[in-house]
Amino acid sequence: VHFYPARTKTGGNQIAPSTGYDWIIVHYSVRLPMPYFDKFLNSLCKIALKKALFIQDEYDSVRQTYAWLEKIRFNIVFTCVPKKNINLIYPKTRFPYTIFKNVFTGYVPDWAYKKKVFTSFEKRKVDVGYRGRQLPLRYGLLGLMKYKIGNEFPKKQI
């Protein structure tokens, strides 16, 4: 397994490697609708290797995402869409070459689950961790709330 960035540190696009691998796995940080990945995504279209995609934020720029899925023909897409709705969102008639598999966006590693002994509350340096960012207005009230939670939580007295 090798890490291969889709963009350089200066923001330039890369071309996906076309040989030497069995699979190319595209991380969800390569956002299909974003034009700064076009060179990388176009290079995937020309590669005969098997391709997998981990996708998130599927509600964003759906038409562009569909266009790339049709063009690249991923073998498998790991999606956040609930299993019962996958065919509704990704109809087999539109994506006959792709298997869509429901997954969570995060998992607890086995070592943490098996640990069963955790740092006591008194010894913890952080009680609550939260990651959020200010989103564009097109995400509406829920997008704003995601950002506000991080700013407002520390002000609350429990």
Image: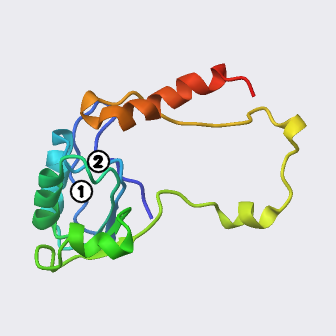
Let me know if residue 110 appears in the view: yes
Amino acid residing under circle 1: Ala
Q: Look at the image and name its color scheme.
A: rainbow
Question: In screen coordinates, is 80 left or right of 99?
Answer: right
Question: In screen coordinates, is 25 left or right of 16?
Answer: right
Q: Residues within 10 Å of mark 1 (few under 14, many from 20)?
A: some
Let me know if residue 20 appears in the view: no
The residue drawn where x is 17% and y is 74% is 91
Q: Residue at the top extreme?
A: 155
Picture coordinates of residue 9 (x, y %)? Answer: 34, 33
Picture coordinates of residue 57 (x, y %)? Answer: 32, 50
Q: Quadrant of residue 46?
A: bottom left
Residue at image mark 1 = 16
Dot label at residue 157: none
Mark 2: which secondary structure?
loop
The residue drawn where x is 35% and y is 47% is 29
Question: In screen coordinates, is 37 left or right of 56?
Answer: left
Q: Which badge, 1 or 2, comes first in the chain's sequence?
A: 2
Q: Residues within 10 Å of mark 2 (few under 14, many from 20)?
A: many
Q: Is residue 138 above or below residue 112?
A: above
Q: Work out how far the residue at label 1 is from the one at label 2, CA to CA, in angstroms.
A: 7 Å
Residue at image mark 2 = 6
Q: Quadrant of the N terminus?
A: bottom left
Q: Quadrant of the C terminus?
A: top right
Q: In front here: 62 or 54? A: 62
Tag 1–tag 2 contact (CB < 8 Å): yes
Q: Is residue 40 above or below residue 46?
A: above
Q: Quadrant of residue 80?
A: bottom left
Picture coordinates of residue 43 (x, y %)? Answer: 15, 57
